[in-house]
Structure formats: structure tokens, C-alpha cells
Amino acid sequence: MTLGNFSALWQNNMKRMLAYSSIAHAGYLLLGIAVLSNQGMLAILIYFAVYLLMNMGAFLVVMLIANKIGSENIDDYDGLGHTSPFLGVALAIFLVSLTGLPPTAGFVGKLYLFIALVDAKMIAVAVIALLNSVVSLYYYIRVLKHMFLTKPEKETQIVTTTLPNTILVSFLVTAILVFGVYFSPIVDAAKNCLVLLGF
């Protein structure tokens, strides 16, 4: 968690930042294994399902933007939220979810991990995980600042998407928001998986 988050903190390349962020999220998943309980396994399954949606969405949007503007540098995202609001808002939702803030599915994933840690009386580890989430909040918010608050030095390109990509991004955004509020289907599916696996 700490290695991934602090490495991501210094990145100006969006794909590299998300890649180091993925290392941090792998660390969060390992917390569920460290607990060595059914609650920990349940948390892993929920977190992995949610992480799949939000990370796929974030990488997809970054790829679509890079293909259009020819850059993955965070400075080239200046004003993008205004010129390309669909992709700007979608990326914002994915990044908020990766941080683990409500009302997104990422919050649900981290909530179950923290519940598993507290149940196992691993309070110190839970505090470290919480502090790591604060670190990740900084570098995700930095992207939002560039997209919505920083005035571009040059004219920002309008990034358009094809219909299939628009549908896919919309589906992932909707899933992140819906499961952030109505998460019982994911929890039930995770519990059924544990039963099938014999836990």
C-alpha cells in the first residue's frame, strides 16, 4: 500500500500513476488475506469486484484521452473537464471511487476491508490503511484540479468518443454509482462464492 501510494504521488504520467495506484490496491487486497477469516475473504471478493469496475473505467478514459491528445501527462489535462465534460466527469467519478469515498462502490469495498480488520483487532493496520487512503486522495484530487480548476496555457482539445466507448464508459460509471448505494447484490454474490469455495 505504502510503496504504491508514495510512488504514485510523484508521477506526472497518468498511466504510470494508475499503475502505481494498482500496486497500492493490491496491498489493500492483501489486508483481507492477512486477517485470515471469512470476513476477510468476503472483503477481498467485494473489493476485487469493485476494483475491477473502477480501474477498468479509469484506464479506459485515460486511454481515450491519450489517443486523442497524444499525451498522458497530467499537465495536458488542464481544462479538460470543461472542454470534454463527459470524460472529465467520468474520470472524476472513477478516481473518487478509487480513493474510497462515498457514494461510490470504492467506499463499499474499503468499508468491508476495514470491518474485517477491526473484527480481527488489527487496529494499527487499519490506521495505516486509512492514512494510505489519505495519501491516495492527494494524487487523485490533483488530477481533478488540473481538469476542472487549472486554466490551460494552450487551447485544450475536445475529446470525443465513439458510441461503443460512450456506452461502455456510461455503463461503468453507472455501476460504480449504483453499487455505491445499493451494494447488496455484490455482497450476496461474494457470500455465494465463499459458500461454493467451502468457506
Image: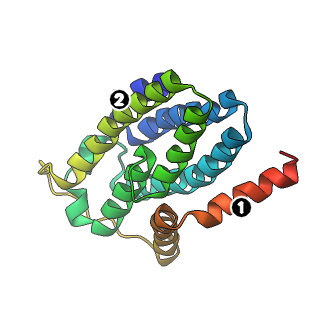
Q: Which residue is mark 1?
A: 189
The disc labelled 1 sits on which kind of residue? Ala
Q: Please, is residue 197 above or below residue 87 in the view? A: above
- Please identify the quarter of the rendering in which residue 87 is found: bottom left
- Residue at label 2? 9
Residue 42, position as x, y percentages in the image:
68, 47
Colour mapping used in the image: rainbow
Q: Is residue 111 above or below residue 11?
A: below
Count of numbered circles in the view:
2
Say which residue appears at 64% left-offset and 58% top-offset. Answer: 187
| Other residues around mark 2 within 10 Å, as few (<14) / some (14–19) / many (≥20) | some
Q: Earlier in the sequence, mark 2 or mark 1?
A: 2
What element does badge 1 sit on?
helix
Residue 59 appearing in the image: no
Residue positioned most to the bottom: 163
Q: Amino acid at mark 2?
A: Leu
Locate residue 130: give its quadrant.
top left
What distance separates the C-alpha of mark 2 from that of mark 1? 34 Å
Q: Is residue 90 shown left or right of residue 155?
A: right
Screen quadrant of the C terminus: top right
- Residue sitting at 45 percent across and 24 percent down? 128
Q: What percent of the width, then of the height, locates residue 31?
A: 61, 31
Question: In this image, 197 relative to 111: left or right?
Answer: right
**On screen, 179 above or below 94?**
below
